[in-house]
Image: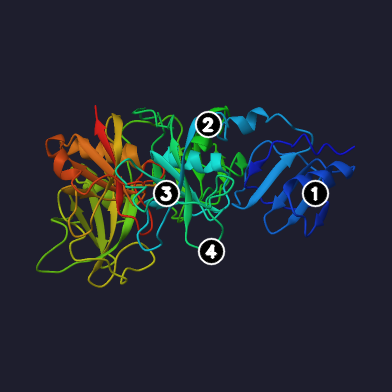
């Protein structure tokens, strides 16, 4: 019996992987559901908008792989399971339809266009809520648009011809959009307390390990696995999702492995960092770093140790033998980037490898103020600091700006840290608000936008 009248709960975005059977030229996801209902071994299906239907022999408890134009459903699940309802927008959230309006491709009524096409109306609304938008627009039966309260979304006047709440017909006709007011916006909890993450350091090959876990997304997840293992004394995580639990602690970064991080169990204070920022030019008559250590030919770690004892925030290695130190107020990148550094991390001819070595500061709390525009030639904030890891960008930026006696900080380009003062908020916000921040870490790609925080 085929239950066409009881549509299964569907999730947007699942790549099928291996399948029992693939059908083509299937017009709707409901027709794909019927094929799964008729297939004895089918436990779920994936339907793609190019009319492909994949019947699968397994059920899913999470939407692990994202693919924007697919729908996935588990067999017989008419009511959405708990794992779906905790990840997806509830269909009951308020969404007020304002009407059908004209748009102009050369003078858009709405500021933000979402890159994923063919979202549902409720999914588009959730995207706009997450951005803090007030208005949502659906156009050409496939495009999701968002705007804030300052955009004149009705400036081209009302239109006729919108259908099924998803705008006008497809290109090449004049664009029409169905306009909605988005209420009950999703907001980030404004008070964020720094987690007790262990001190991390870049670059360590694991060697022999107690346990090797895969598909681990963050250092914190790897840390939790170590905490659950009685013999684990340290962890190494690489950029490919591998988490290694080790039966020994490390005091030095003996072997460099790009993209990997090491942490000793339980160490949350007096973190000693050694994070490579990049390769930069130096000029003999105008040094980028103020102090050269007398001892030559030492290791990179020993250079960092010597600079820490001087109270420096940066160490630099040059000419394969020279150790340099600098504090955080020095413009160590003033001569620009270089490609002359050797692969061993010890600089090169007229160039030095720059490292961040600053001890982590005491944890701070901070509140998200909002997302704001920036301009490369007219920066909104006065001071820029460097060397943030993307995973702990906000926490690291807060610590560094606090050390420099600032009470506000901003994250831009996902890992760039800027500091400013609350007495200059009008200047900081002078370019206006933006809708292009993601992950509360500013814009990415072509969007010059920053997430602004206030420290408590």
Mark 2, residue position: 224
Q: Quadrant of the C terminus?
A: top left
CA–CA distance in space, label 1 to label 4:
33 Å
What's the mark number on residue 55? 1
CA–CA distance in space, label 4 to label 3:
19 Å
Element carrying mark 4: loop
- The image shows residue 401 at horizontal and vertical percentages of 21, 39
**Residue at the spot 17% in from the left edge and 37% down from the top edge:** 406
Q: Earlier in the sequence, mark 3 or mark 1?
A: 1
Front in this rendered view, residue 222 or 390: 390
**Residue at the spot 52% in from the left edge and 66% down from the top edge:** 172
Closer to us: mark 3 or mark 1?
3
Front in this rendered view, residue 114 or 199: 114
Q: Residues within 10 Å of mark 4 (few under 14, many from 20)?
A: few
Closer to us: mark 1 or mark 2?
1
Element carrying mark 2: helix
Q: Residues within 10 Å of mark 2 (few under 14, many from 20)?
A: few
Mark 4, residue position: 171
């Amino acid at each position: 019996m085929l239950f066409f009248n009881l549509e299964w709960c569907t999730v947007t975005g699942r790549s099928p992987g291996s399948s029992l059977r693939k059908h083509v030229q299937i017009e709707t996801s409901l027709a794909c559901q019927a094929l799964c209902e008729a297939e004895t071994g089918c436990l779920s299906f994936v339907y793609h908008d190019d009319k492909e239907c994949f019947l699968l022999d397994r059920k899913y408890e999470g939407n692990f792989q994202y693919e924007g134009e697919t729908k996935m459903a588990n067999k017989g699940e008419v009511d959405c399971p708990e794992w779906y309802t905790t990840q997806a927008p509830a269909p009951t959230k308020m969404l007020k339809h304002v009407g059908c309006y004209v748009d102009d491709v050369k003078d858009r009524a709405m500021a933000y266009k979402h890159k994923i096409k063919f979202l549902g109306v409720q999914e588009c609304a959730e995207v706009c809520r997450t951005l803090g938008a007030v208005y949502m627009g659906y156009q050409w039966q496939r495009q999701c648009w968002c705007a804030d309260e300052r955009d004149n979304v009705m400036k081209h006047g009302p239109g006729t011809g919108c259908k099924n709440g998803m705008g006008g017909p497809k290109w090449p006709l004049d664009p029409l959009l169905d306009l909605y007011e988005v209420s009950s916006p999703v907001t980030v909890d404004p008070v964020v307390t720094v987690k007790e993450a262990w001190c991390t350091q870049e670059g360590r090959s694991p060697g022999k390990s107690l346990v090797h876990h895969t598909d681990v997304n963050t250092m914190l997840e790897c840390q939790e696995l170590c905490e659950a293992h009685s013999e684990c004394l340290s962890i190494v995580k690489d950029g490919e999702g591998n988490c290694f639990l080790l039966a020994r602690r490390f005091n030095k970064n003996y072997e460099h492995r790009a993209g990997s991080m090491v942490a000793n169990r339980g160490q949350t204070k007096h973190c000693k960092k050694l994070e490579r920022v990049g390769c930069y030019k130096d000029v003999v008559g105008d040094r980028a770093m103020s102090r050269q250590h007398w001892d030559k030919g030492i290791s990179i770690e020993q250079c960092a140790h010597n600079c820490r004892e001087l109270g420096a925030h940066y160490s630099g290695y040059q000419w394969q033998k020279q150790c340099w130190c600098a504090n955080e107020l020095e413009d160590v990148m003033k001569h620009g980037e270089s490609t002359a550094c050797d692969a061993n991390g010890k600089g090169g001819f007229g160039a030095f490898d720059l490292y961040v070595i600053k001890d982590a500061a005491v944890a701070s709390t901070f509140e998200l103020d909002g997302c704001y525009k920036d301009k490369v030639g007219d920066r909104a904030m006065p001071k820029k600091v460097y060397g943030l890891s993307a995973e702990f960008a906000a926490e690291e930026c807060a610590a560094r700006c606090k050390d420099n006696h600032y009470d506000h900080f901003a994250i831009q380009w996902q890992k760039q840290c800027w500091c400013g003062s609350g007495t200059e908020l009008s200047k900081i916000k002078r370019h206006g608000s933006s809708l292009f921040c993601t992950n509360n870490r500013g814009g990415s790609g072509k969007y010059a936008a920053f997430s602004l925080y206030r420290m408590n």
